[in-house]
Image (spheres, rainbow, N blue to C red):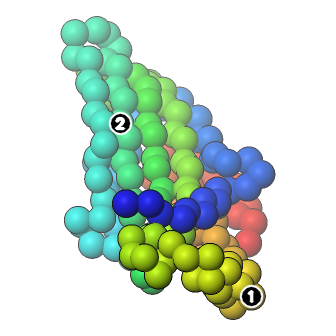
């Protein structure tokens, strides 16, 4: 089914927040992440996915990789997709230092399906463009700003969990 899609990065122009950590028990963030995503994005558990998890317990220190995705729907067109990637090493002794880095990204997707004869006509596409350009543009900008704020709140929660001195959050 053809679909008209608008996609914007929430963190433009940087596109990603990167957090580096070296200290005790970095893997503790993995256990806290689903709760952070549910609370900060105000979604239910079904909207938080663990897309990938890898753990190598054969090496010392133990290597891990995890990717979480959260989906926050706003209206019939727009949805925020945020992704958190964590990668690092965790010694088998939690009293030894490990290290990790965290990448946070987010996108606002606005979709308008073209699944009917009417929605494929030039008149419909012209009216849709006019509506999205004049009325819905401000709504999308508000969603983008909310996404950016939520991603910065997530960064702050991660830094507090890891014991990193938080930097000033730009709002």
Can the viewer see residue 159 in this picture? Answer: no
Q: Which residue is mark 2?
A: 66
Q: Nearer the viewer, mark 1 or mark 2?
A: 1
How many circles with numbers are drawn on the protein?
A: 2
Question: Where does the image place residue 82, in percent across and percent down from the top left?
Answer: 48, 56
Label 1 crowding class (10 Å Cα cut-off): few <14, some 14-19, many 20+? few
Q: Find residue 7 and report its horizontal and vertical position in percent.
A: 60, 59
Q: Can residue 113 be seen from the camera position used here?
A: yes
Work out whether 109 lies above or below 118: above
The CA distance from mark 1 to mark 2 is: 40 Å
Q: Earlier in the sequence, mark 1 or mark 2?
A: 2
**Who is closer to the viewer here, 75 or 90?**
75
Q: Nearer the viewer, residue 83 or 160?
A: 83
Which residue is identified by label 1? 134
Q: Residue at x 44, y 70 (%)?
A: 113
What secondary structure is marked by label 2?
strand
Res. 18 mark:
none
């Amino acid at each position: 089914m053809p679909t008209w899609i608008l996609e914007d990065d929430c963190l433009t122009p940087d596109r990603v927040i990167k957090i580096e950590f070296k200290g005790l028990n970095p893997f503790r963030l993995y256990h806290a992440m689903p709760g952070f995503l549910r609370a900060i994005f105000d979604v239910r558990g079904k909207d938080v996915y663990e897309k990938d998890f890898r753990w190598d317990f054969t090496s010392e220190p133990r290597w891990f990789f995890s990717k979480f995705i959260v989906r926050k729907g706003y209206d019939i067109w727009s949805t925020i997709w945020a992704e958190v990637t964590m990668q690092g090493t965790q010694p088998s002794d939690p009293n030894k230092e490990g290290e990790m880095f965290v990448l946070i990204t987010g996108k606002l997707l606005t979709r308008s399906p073209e699944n009917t004869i009417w929605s494929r006509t030039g008149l419909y596409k012209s009216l849709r463009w006019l509506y999205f350009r004049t009325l819905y543009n401000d709504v999308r900008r508000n969603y983008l700003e909310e996404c950016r704020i939520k991603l910065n709140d997530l960064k702050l929660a991660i830094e507090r969990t890891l014991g990193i001195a938080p930097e000033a959050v730009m709002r």
